[in-house]
Image (cartoon, rainbow, N blue to C red):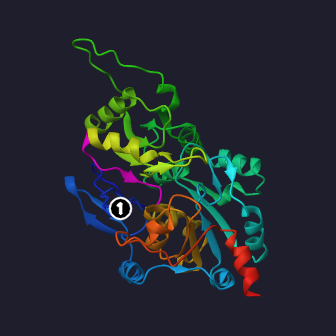
Amino acid sequence: MLQVRASPAFLASTSSPSSSSQEPTSFGRSIQRRGGGLISVAAPPQHHAARRSVMAAAGATKLEDADALIDSVETFIFDCDGVIWKGDKLIDGVPETLDLLRSKGKRLVFVTNNSTKSRKQYGKKFETLGLTVNEEEIFASSFAAAAYLQSIDFPKDKKVYVIGEEGILKELELAGFQHLGGPSDGDKKIELKPGFYMEHDKDVRAVVVGFDRYFNYYKVQYGTLCIRENPGCLFLATNRDAVTHLTDAQEWAGGGSMVGAILGSTKQEPLVVGKPSTFMMDYLAKKFGITTSQICMVGDRLDTDILFGQNGGCKTLLVLSGVTSLETLQSPDNSIQPDFYTNQISDFLTLKAASV
């Protein structure tokens, strides 16, 4: 259980090579922070960092023997956007690939930084796309935000202000937390008349920021007031993704743009609960009793998916069906190298056939 006292100043996360965002975790060591309190945190073990350095020097290996990778792990964790689907369109070969892995007795888990839906809502999306996925196999960053607040015993008599969409609200409700904000604040405007003073709820003790298509200046100001003026108010981010796939036609500004606005006005780094924070990895490992060395993380982003797997001590597979191109992967400026890369997860099928 994470022990929190005084205002938050958590260990820096590595959501990107240059990021200094904070990373929550439910396991680890105690360090001194600003404000005099202690907090338990977990940095990735040194051997994981050393392994990343070796991988960066050697470069990623193109996946050629899918069977060998499949047989080497018990669990596959899949990102969703850019791996399973793009927007509302299923990527070719996904159903057959998941069926193959299940037939081999592999546990499948789906982890997404997209906080717009709850786990139940994501279950419906999988169903609409013709995929049979249990709700217990789905972990969205909306759920991670609620799970994190539960892990620190966030007081039920205090409130959470949400800059985000329905998924965060639903998960907070399921966890029993009081909340305000969300889509209902999307139409609110501020009339900047002389002497205007904006009130805010003094009982808000956490501001959760996720992707928000209804983002506006009212939300920026309200969240800023809560973080700056309410003692000990937490600033949580579901993710800091630069872009997202709202459609399969192009990339769209991601949740990181909303988080960046609040960071800019508060001058406080967010505590990130989504990838690449190890919070969800620790949660999954504990829930399912998984040894992380028996997990392969499959994703399309280097600075979230692959780093998430590496920080957790997992094998990593980058697919080029989403954000990251082969040119980006092989660029001298890229220091994040997965164990393997391939075009898309359906290569498990063709590479298997080719190896017979």
| Mark 1 closeness class: few <14, some 14–19, many ≥20 residues within 10 Å | many
Q: Answer whether residue 124 is magenta in the image.
A: no
Residue located beneath label 1 in the image: 13
Residue extending farthest to the top is: 194
Give residue 10's position: percent from left, percent from top: 31, 58
Position of residue 54 in the picture relative to residue 230 (left or right)? right
Q: Which residues are magenta?
A: 266-276
Give residue 73's position: percent from left, percent from top: 62, 80
Look at label 1 and name its amino acid. Answer: Ser
Residue extending farthest to the front is: 327
- Using the image as rendered, state which of residue 45 and residue 89 is in the foreground: 89
Would residue 233 be seen by someone viewing this image from the given angle?
no
Position of residue 241 in the picture relative to residue 270 (left or right)? right
Dot 1: what SS? loop
Give residue 343's position: percent from left, percent from top: 61, 69
Instruction: Identify the image quadrant of the C terminus.
Output: bottom right
Residue 196: quadrant of the picture: top left
User: Which residue is pictured at 65% across the width and 54% down the height?
Assistant: 85
Q: Is residue 125 above or below residue 285?
A: above
User: Which residue is pictured at 77% across the width and 72% down the height?
Assistant: 100
Query: What kind of secondary structure does the magenta stretch mostly adopt?
Result: loop
- Using the image as rendered, state which of residue 287 and residue 69 is in the foreground: 69
Q: How many marks?
A: 1
Would residue 325 be seen by someone viewing this image from the given angle?
yes
Position of residue 196 in the picture relative to residue 270 (left or right)? left
User: Which residue is pictured at 76% across the width and 47% down the height?
Assistant: 128
Give residue 163's position: percent from left, percent from top: 44, 37
Instruction: Identify the image quadrant of the N terminus.
Output: bottom left
- Using the image as rendered, state which of residue 275 and residue 290 is in the foreground: 275
